[in-house]
Image: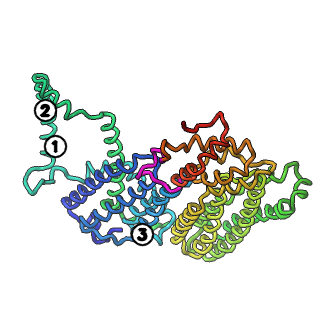
Amino acid sequence: MLDQTSTPDRFGAASKSRIALTVLGAALLLGVVGDVLLRPMPWGINMLLWIAALALGIVALAQWNNLQLTGGGRWLIGPALIFAALFALRDSIMLNSANLLAILICLALIAYRALRGRIRVATLTEYTRGTALASAFGLFGAFVLVFDDIKWGSIKIGGQSRHVAAVGTGVLIAVPMLLVFGSLLTSADAVFQKLIDDLFNWDVYEIISHTFWIGCWAWIVGGFLRMTFLFKESQAKPSTYKGALGAVEVSIVLGSLGALFFGFVVVQARYLFGGAEALRSLIKLSFAEYARRGFFELVTVAALVLPFLLFLHWLMKKDDPRSARLFRYLSGGVIGLLFVIMFSALYRMRLYQIEFGLTELRLYTTAFMGWLAIVLVWFMLTVPRGKSDRFAFGALASALAVLLALNILNPDDLIVRVNAGRVDAANGFDASYVVGLSADAVPALITTLPAMKEYDRCTTAAQIVQRWSPTTGGTPPQHFDALTWNWDRWQAWQAVNANWAYLQSVACPQHDSRMD
């Protein structure tokens, strides 16, 4: 992100101190912006405004200090802004938690790649190290910025000989003096006391609250900006590790794992894919119970195989072409069998969904399996072919793409619509579950109310009325302000307002919260 000819170690102490001072000033300003934007909850468009302000702060600091934004990580500000904007679209807590994680990873890699150059060619270890280092800087970087990077005694104000340290000393002496003499003078004259009381008639709790959050955001941003502009990582020595496992070890490990997977696949083909009757002839479980029992175990197997293969590849001898060739063929066979196991897991989930409906956990786990399938294909195209430094970027890019697809899909709305088609099933519509979903689900819930059974319709309408009651005059609830505005929350209120009379008429009387 920074031009390598402008790294801080090329500057003198005074220049570094000047850059650190501008970083501190930007952090304090962004702390105030963060307090204004992020205090209102739940987050909506304010998250986008905050990330945009942070991006502008980075650009402004670079321009102010004549540092060129030329690194490979700067483009990640685009995905960070996109996922911040999605806070103004979706209301799901689970989905927005994933969006927030995506933003933090993008920001961490922006700061880290400012030190090391390109982001498309980097090992998984570098990605992990970058996110861990950014977390450490967010927690402790501001401390180093204030007490080490800035040489307070050498900073002059207005080109004069007065130093910041001297100003600080004067303030420390003046404040207690003003308090002592001011208290005496206010006691001596009632008019002067009233003037002082009116001047300092502040809400102490609000002052403390704002000061805390300004300091909190400034502290985190200060650490992030210090890592981006001032931290210079020492050049790491090339790894001398040559690996320990040869062709025999690789053959045994991957061969035995492939044999285990093959045996499991044979069982699946005979019993699970053979239908319910073949299954009942072997075990005393229903088809749905069998599917429920196996899905998450198979997801765990699929999730563990990838890190195991990466670790095995790291242990393999680097200068042994035969080991590399065996790893490529055998790992390909293992992944091929793993795809069959993953298909079995998805088939089980389909059976269980038909029996019991769709939930957030089932949907997001299925999405994770889809992402894992993409990453496994990318693994085969990179790691065994000597391109392991491209693997991490593909894994990250595919994860961001899947998360973006989930935001577009609107999971809570999908869950309601899928489950609404099961009202006559043995394990029918679970109103108590879907009514607890986010605002994303409210329009679909109102649409499907007529198809529900009477009790489900009654309780669901009552919960919607209780949660989304409009204020007098048909205006939105007070929490719909400019900073927390969110499309799905607004759509939920619009749907409730348009169907208010119907919702009141079908809501259970004991839960009726209609307005006078």
Q: Main secondary structure of the magenta part?
A: loop
Query: If you read the primary sequence from the N terminus, does the residue marked by circle 1 or circle 2 appear first?
Result: 1
Secondary structure at badge 3 equals helix
In this rendering, would 454 be left or right of 86? right
- C-alpha span from label 3 to label 2: 52 Å
Q: Can you see residue 284?
A: yes
Say which mark, if any, is on residue 168: 1
- C-alpha span from label 1 to label 2: 15 Å
**Which segment is the magenta one?**
475-488
Q: Amino acid at mark 1?
A: Gly
What x and y, as percent, mark residue 298?
A: 72, 57
Residue found at the very far left of the displayed protein: 160
Query: If you read the primary sequence from the N terminus, does the residue marked by circle 3 or circle 2 appear first?
Result: 3
Foreground of the two, 272 or 126? 272
Say which mark, if any, is on residue 178: 2
Query: If you read the primary sequence from the N terminus, does the residue marked by circle 3 or circle 1 appear first?
Result: 3
Q: Can you see residue 314?
A: no
What x and y, as percent, mark residue 156?
A: 12, 54
Residue occupied by mark 3: 75
